[in-house]
Image (tube, rainbow, N blue to C red):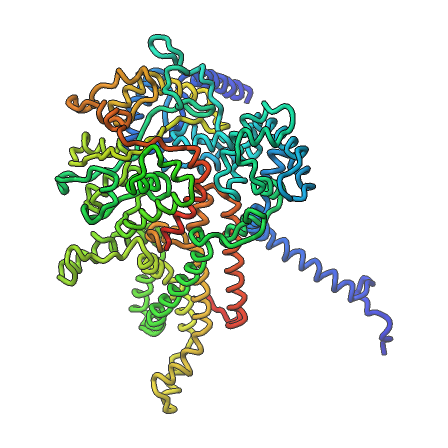
Amino acid sequence: MPDPTTPILTADGTPLKAKLAQTTRQLKWKAFLLTLPLVLFVVITFVLPIGQMLYRSVHNPAGSNVVPQFAEFIQEWDGQGLPDDKYVESFVKDLAVARKNREIGKTVGNLATRVNYEMPGSRSLITSTARKAAKITEGPYLDALIKINKKWENPAIWLTLQRVSKDYTLAFYLAATDMKYDETGKIVQADDLYQIYIPILLKTLWLSAVITVLCFILAYPVSYLLSTLPLRTSNLLMILVLLPFWTSLLVRTTAWIAMLQTEGIINDALVFLGAIDDDGRIQMIYNQTGTIISMVHILLPFMILPLFSVMKTIPPSYMRAAKSMGASTFYSFRRVYFPQTIPGIAAGTLLVFILAIGYYITPALVGGNDGLLISNLIADHIKKTLNWSLGAALGTILLVVVMVFYWIYNKLVGVDNLKFG
Amino acid sequence: MKLKLLISSMALSLGMGFAGSASAAGGEITVVSWGGAYTKSQVEAYHKPWIAKTGNKIKSEDYNGGIAEIKAMVEAGNVSWDIVDVELSDAIRACDEGLLETIDHSKLPPAKDGTPATEDFIEGTLYDCAVANIVWSTIFAYDKSKMPEGPKTMADFFDTKKFPGKRGLRKGAKVNLEFALMADGVAAKDVYSVMETEEGIDRAFKKLDTIKDDVVWWEAGAQPPQLLADGEVAMTTAYNGRIFNAVAGEDKPFEIVWDGQVWDLDLWVIPKGTKNKELAMDFLGFSTGTEPLAAQASWISYGPARKSSAPLVGNYATNEKIDMAPQMPTNPENLTNAVQNNFEFWADNADQLNERFNAWLAK
């Protein structure tokens, strides 16, 4: 009988336990090395950009880049009333130096832009003052600035300067949630007239939900047909589903423009049939309706395919069995068939909903004024207003919203129940 | 082996010899502008003569304004645009942010009579990083054949009772607020002082509210003449040159209303870090010379930025009967109720007002 305290040895005399651990370690390493290309790919093309986006949404060093000494010094100021002349002196001197700097990210314009985000209307205050800053050679510096422009009398501008002198800021998240710092530096709701991001985000969620439901209603019968028809007919039907799926997104969107516009095919047909008169053409595009119609069409295959793949696996004999035991068609569908399709429904709705939340090109082309989604605003800030930090903050919020939905979804349906095919 | 090496190195040195001489002529620059009739006028008046004179090539690209592309290129250190036609407020902002090369005004060619460029250019058209080429204007226009008794004033544009039909407006706050205020009875000279106040902005948006449901928004300069021609709108704001082009070049029955026009400058800028800076600078100097500027004005009704070009502006290039002078935004008769776009106001307030504009639009 072997002694339980002496370890079992392998042929070369090492303990079996250690040998086993070593082998598994080696296998794990091999497996890891195999996935390394993918891991690197994901890190470089996905994790790093998203990390950079998160970073950019809170990190905006305009202050310490442009007026470095002042940016450090002003943090000592207690923020009461107007700052002491020693702070102003360092501001004026830094500004005079910055005026000559042409390096990207470190020019007076960069500081002016940043200040202008938080205090609209103060860009020219900074740039015009910078032009004259070198001429101010002796104190009192604050009075000299006020002589250049009355706005320097306003304590709010100094509070803003103190805030933008910090490298890390929440200002862009405030802006992205329709809030701002007020004159005294307190966080308040933005004026009603400037409320835009939260309403559009809510609208995006609402429209995505509507689109998902419509997709589901349209896709369910189609998928059922696909899975039950004889092979020849179902293949043809499948091609009809896949053909648009393979067609370029832009082509499909512009096709919808041709169909739906006021001088378009549908309106022409309705006028021809006498259903509406020529002046009463229906506005179906460049608004929410247009966005919903074309997005439902474009996202439909993402609902059909997972549904189809799940339905295909359900043997028709189940329904027959239920019916033979006396269940009505509806009852057997509800109790037998439908529950078995839930993994497909779950996958389809999740896919469509998450794709819809981030949709960009289609609403940009057919959304007009009230069919725009949050991603269009993000694009606007990246491409037009150049407020990349605000764009990044909005993007981060969108990412968080999607993750929250995924989490809720996981709680409700269970991600393990998903079946994509 | 040795022989092969020798031949290839010879070929190489020969090739380099060619390349060396090619840099003087045979270089290529990318010139970016607003497309359509406007780019065509530049191709005729600037590109072709410059190509003929220097032997270099030009790649012409179109864009819709703004400095996003320039910023992205410069920050990524991969500048493929060599010279860009931009609006004043964008030129100032891009220059402030260090995205543009500074331009030595002394290198610009003098006028024929020897007047240095700095005195020949109209006041307020030369900047550290930008040189103006033309004065253009946003006006509104309508189709005469559909509206014989057409609108006369900016107030008429906002009067959908008197003049029913859709209106075309550029999507954005700029210029629309100015128009709204003038339509609401603000004198041209007071427009920007009214806009400095919150009440003034409220007033402008309130006026825009009155036509909001009738507006078709456009973004590219080529759209408004198309909207008018298609009958999508009864009247539309537009860049004056585009409407002129549709009238003179395509015989469209459009009429420009100059009342309340907002005029502005277009300027050449050179993005920082372009590899063809010398060539771009050469093109900039050439194209803003007295004659090319005057020549451009014979292709499109935008006023030249040089004083010495004005007397040379003659008739429309493809139709001798059309005198260009009365078509210019700067023609005294057209200036009776006009505003110059206040670039400083827009540099300060564009972000905020566009946000409000977007919120307004989405409601």
In this orientation, which residue lies closer to the viewer: B74 or B112? B112
Q: Quadrant of residue A274?
A: bottom left
Looking at this view, name the residue that lies furthest to the bottom. A326
Please say whether residue A44 is visible from this viewpoint: no
Query: Which residue does the image show at 32% across and 34% down from the upper left?
Result: B188
In this orientation, which residue lies closer to the viewer: B62 or B228? B228
Find residue B247 and report its horizontal and vertical position in percent. Answer: 19, 32
Relative placement, left or right, of B236 versus A348 is left
Give the quadrant of the C terminus of chain B. Answer: bottom left
Find residue B235 and report its horizontal and vertical position in percent. Answer: 22, 42
B190 to A246, vertically: above or below: above
In this orientation, which residue lies closer to the viewer: A340 or A147? A147
A227 to B342, vertically: above or below: below
Q: Quadrant of residue A205?
A: bottom left
Give the quadrant of the N terminus of chain B. Answer: top right
Relative placement, left or right, of B84 versus A102 is left
A159 to A405, vertically: above or below: above
Q: Quadrant of residue A309?
A: bottom left
Relative placement, left or right, of A174 versus B56 is right
In this orientation, which residue lies closer to the viewer: A239 or B153? B153
Find residue A138 and report its horizontal and vertical position in percent. Answer: 65, 24
Relative placement, left or right, of A328 versus B299 is right
Please say whether residue B333 is visible from this viewpoint: yes
